[in-house]
Amino acid sequence: MQVSFKMLSIGTVLLFGVSVAAAGAPTATIDTGPIVGTTTSFPSSSTTVNKFLGVPFGTVPKRFMPAEIPEPWTELRNTTSASAACIQQFRYPEDYRNLFLNLLNTPAPEESEDCLNLNVYAPATRAPDNGRAVMFWIFGGGLFSGHGSYPVYDGSHLASYEDVIVVTPNYRTNIFGFPNAPSQKRNLGFMDQRLALDWVQRNIASFGGDPKKVTIFGESAGSLSVDALITGYPGNSTPPFRAAIMQSGQLSYHSTSNPGPPGLPYPDKPAWDGIIRGLNCTNNTIEESFECVQNAPASLIKDISEKQELLFMPVADNDTFVSDLTPRRRAKNIARVPLLIGTNQDEGSLVGGLFYTNLTTYLNTTFGSQLTPKLLADIDRVYPMGSAQFPTVREVISAIEGDTSMLCGTALVAQDTATSGLLTWRYLYNATFPSTFFLPNIGVYHTSEISMVFSTYPIPAQYGTVNATATPQQFVLSNLMRAAWARFAKDPTAGPGWTAVGSGKDYLDSEPDRDVAVLSKEGISVKRQKDVDERCAVWKDVLKG
């Protein structure tokens, strides 16, 4: 990619690459028309970043229908600020709602059904002739909330310091993305992600990127989405990505009693029924009820969904979400791409540890009929309440929640992937810093690694932090993690910098088969999988693939 510093008139249409408009702002021409962005820079980096924010990749979708490529435009389009997020849903009970409003929706974005846009962060320097690696971020939020312009997901540091291009798209969530209506069994949110990936294939060269060097990465529901993409492309296909990173989430293994959000009861009735009752769309045929919901005000649908605590989840369509993820992975019938996968030390502290004070209630709610006398005895043995490791019920619930919803399933996916012949690297994030605490006693909580990868710490004071000053250790560890993620994206076969799962090789002076990287205040060390996963044997009959 050649960056031109000629002063061009604002109406100039560019044929290739990125140039600079009259005001010194970067411009680019994509297949739907010319766009103008903005720039950012950092005192410690010589590389300015070109930012194109709110770039449309899909039409304003008709509700509950797939989006299409936007109509072309001819005038220079302003992409200097983030566009609207898709409609968010934050379910009650109130404690749960307030937690996720604080964690995922502060500051609150504008919301609209006209939301299929993405952000591009690209180094302003000339790209190599073979193009830069591209990191395609899929945000989390339980598939009920989230947006690609959340400040923690700003890709500027990755672009400036690691010489990669970062793309952060929106996609539809909750009922607007996963309605599971009787007449329309579609995962529109997953379809939006694929449409954004298609946009990258068609257009990323205009920003200096190579469409053959795309790494998809995501956290929580974004990591579930990565798993859906990996398993949705057969082994003999050519997917629109060459590597994948899964942070704290997978679709392949879960408790059969409760496949919904961690720690909360899974609804026993379809959420769609709750919507049509709430909107008084019941005295109609299936098709008429669908049209009734299609035409209702979005704000009313959002209000009913939240107050009735309705949960809209993906449906197995054997396209965007296959029903046999684990058999496909073991049969090598998935996208044949290297994988970096991992979890945080205290994944269960946000949900399991905050909303339950009674262990029996938590276990019955979460595991139901799977809670056999043998399992109860194993839980008492492996999670001994009153011990130094588990002094109170809170620590027990948090550990069980983290193990069953994150750690053990991740271990199984990593092992299945490596056994199928794909290069696999694994990590465990285990560091806490004052600047990223927003609640006391939550440890290395779910989502806490994101700002370290993006180097967007410390979390600003308006997000609820008490101390917004980063420590030197935080700075060093973030640099290590950011570089490791980017190193993997640039050369997925070489990996992030430690030994691959099952390689039998040693890392530095450690013993062979220490292949889980522990990312801590001390830097990067390695542990054996069996030591990291020592409690997972308890759950082998609960987690089904």
Image: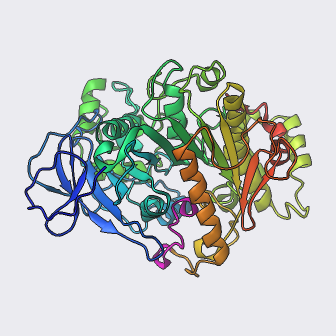
Specify whether 233 is left or right of 397.
Answer: left
* Magenta-drawn segment: 450-463
Q: Is residue 423 above or below residue 481?
A: above
Q: Is residue 386 left or right of residue 39?
A: right
Looking at this view, name the residue that lies furthest to the front: 129
**Towards the viewer: 119 or 311:** 119
Q: Is residue 98 magenta?
A: no
Give whichever of 64, 272 is nearer the camera.
64
Task: Determine whether 200 is above or below 263 in the image.
Answer: above
Q: How many marks?
A: 0
The part of the image, by quadrant, that contains residue 250 is: top right
| Point 9% across, 52% down: residue | 75
Query: x%, y% of residue 276?
Result: 34, 37
Q: In this orientation, does residue 470 appear?
A: yes
**Residue at 64% in and 18% down:** 331
> Does the magenta portion include 462?
yes
Q: Position of residue 1 (x, y in %)?
A: 31, 49
Q: Position of residue 513 (x, y in %)?
A: 83, 41
- Is residue 172 shown to the viewer in this render? no
Q: Looking at the rendering, in which quadrant would you find the C terminus?
A: top right
Q: Residue 328 location, x and y as percent? A: 60, 21
- Please give left or right for residue 144 compared with residue 288 in the image: right
* Depth order, front residue of 30/299: 30
Question: In the image, what residue occupies the spot 48% across and 49% down?
Answer: 309
Q: Residue at x 25, y 37 (%)?
A: 294
